[in-house]
Amino acid sequence: MLPRERIEKVIRLEKTDKVPVAPQVNEHSAKVLGVPYGDVFNDADQAARALLKCYEVYQGVDMSFGGGFGFIYYSPYADAHSSWIFDWKLPLPGEDQVPQMREDQILSSDQYDLLMDKGLLYFIRPGHPGLNDFLGKLVKLSQAMAEVEKKVKELELFHYAMSLINLPSDILANLRGLNGYLMDFYDWPEKLKQACEWMVDDLIAMGLALARQVASSRAGLAQTPTVLIGANRASASYISEKMFEEFAWPFFYREVMAVLNAGFTPVIHLDGNWTPRAHFFRAFPQAKCLFHIDDQNDIFAWKKIMGGHSALMGNVPAALLSRGSVEEVDEYCRRVIEVAGEGGGFVLANACALPYDAKVENVKAMIAAGEKYGVY
Amino acid sequence: MTRREELIAELAKINFYWRELSEGRSEDEIEKIITELKQARQMIKGIFNFKIMINRE
């Protein structure tokens, strides 16, 4: 069975030969190559070399790796990573640092109307990246990644995501700052809801436009077209179920259904604790979505709620991969495969993305665990 | 209205950080910032033509 077919079957809740494994290397790719992350972040060729090195070191995976090149931070896209709008400290060449958002209140509570009147580009920051930075990096990225794409094709790997759609409440949380965002549920609930409503259709349209563009550039490659729907600030780590139901769920539902109706597979990337909200997701069509959950989630509880309904991906903790031993990683993976892998519908992966400083031997142990414990 | 005031008013129409961007800058410098911002906004609008990016001018 080809790796991409294995994951496609997992999403459709069909039988597979084994549990697929999908480490997301991202920033960690620099460590595998043995260079400071700033070098990979700023240099597309170096980022491509880092990814090719990861394919050499981490053999036996089923999903393509996300790269470490910092392109997304230079993109004027409606996303928290965009340094056009949000305040990021980005690593310079030679610096062994990962990007850090300096989250602060950009928008005050009485400026929701200003946002809806002017749009996000009214908030372009002083010292924002130039358009030439963005376009230059876009060209460099496509040139540098040709070899990597060839490798992904040769290995027949599943692509994690072709595009990205945020929840409106996540973007508003970053614009308002966490404190302001949380206060608005009490002080300005109607404005918060109105702004979410104002954003959601455009977030969907932007995400789908980008996904169609990427899918057409990869036409001829047999692969499931995917769109990542990312969510964090509407999780149970931040807001109550009542708040979620009123301010986030209607928009979450619209985004996922729009992605499905457009013929894409939603990869629902959940940061924060979503376990208490997992039951909502049973409203989505069965066997159509992949839920990638991070290590704040109880994957065993998720399996009870979503098993037989939707596929799960996760959630080997970042701390374990960075600080644990090979034996501890092996034991965690064994337990997760035994429970979450029962009857299929499961992809073994790190929570969120691999931490930059994950130990290489631990990532290898996670991949090996798929073979060791995951054969059906 | 002085030329400087006109430029600042124009900048305030297109950017939230107009105070920071105009403070201590000459009229020519402010004009350059306005031109660059307008160009960037138009080019981005060409890529992502959605109201959440640029709504009403």
Image (spheres, helix red, strand yellow):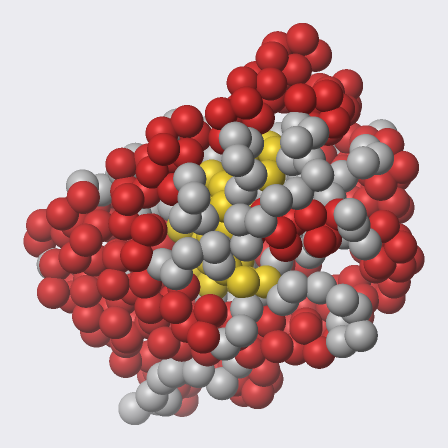
Residue A186 on image: x %, y %? 9, 50
Q: How many marks can you see? A: 0
Q: Is residue A338 visible?
A: yes
Q: In which image quadrant can residue B12 be found? A: bottom left
Q: Is residue A234 above or below residue B19?
A: above
Q: Is residue A217 above or below residue A54?
A: below
Q: Quadrant of the C terminus of chain A?
A: top right
Estimate the x, y position of residue A112 in percent, counting from the top left. 22, 68
* Residue A125 spot, x, y in % from top left: 48, 63
B53 with respect to A6 (left or right): left
**Left or right of A140 in this view: A309:** left
A91 vs A165, nearest the viewer:
A165
Which residue is at 13% across, 47% downward?
A: A242
A270, above or below A80, in the image: above
Residue depicted at x 65% and y 15%:
A330
In this rendering, the answer to whether A312 lies above or below A290 is: above
Mark yes or no: residue A26 visible. Answer: no
Q: Which quadrant of the view contains residue B1?
A: bottom left
Q: Residue at x 41, y 34 (%)?
A: A303
Q: Nearer the viewer, residue B16 or B7?
A: B16
Q: Position of residue B21 (x, y in %)?
A: 45, 67
Q: Residue at x 45, y 48 (%)?
A: A310
Residue A296 appears left or right of A27:
left
Q: Using the image as rendered, state which of residue A366 and residue A148 is in the foreground.
A: A366
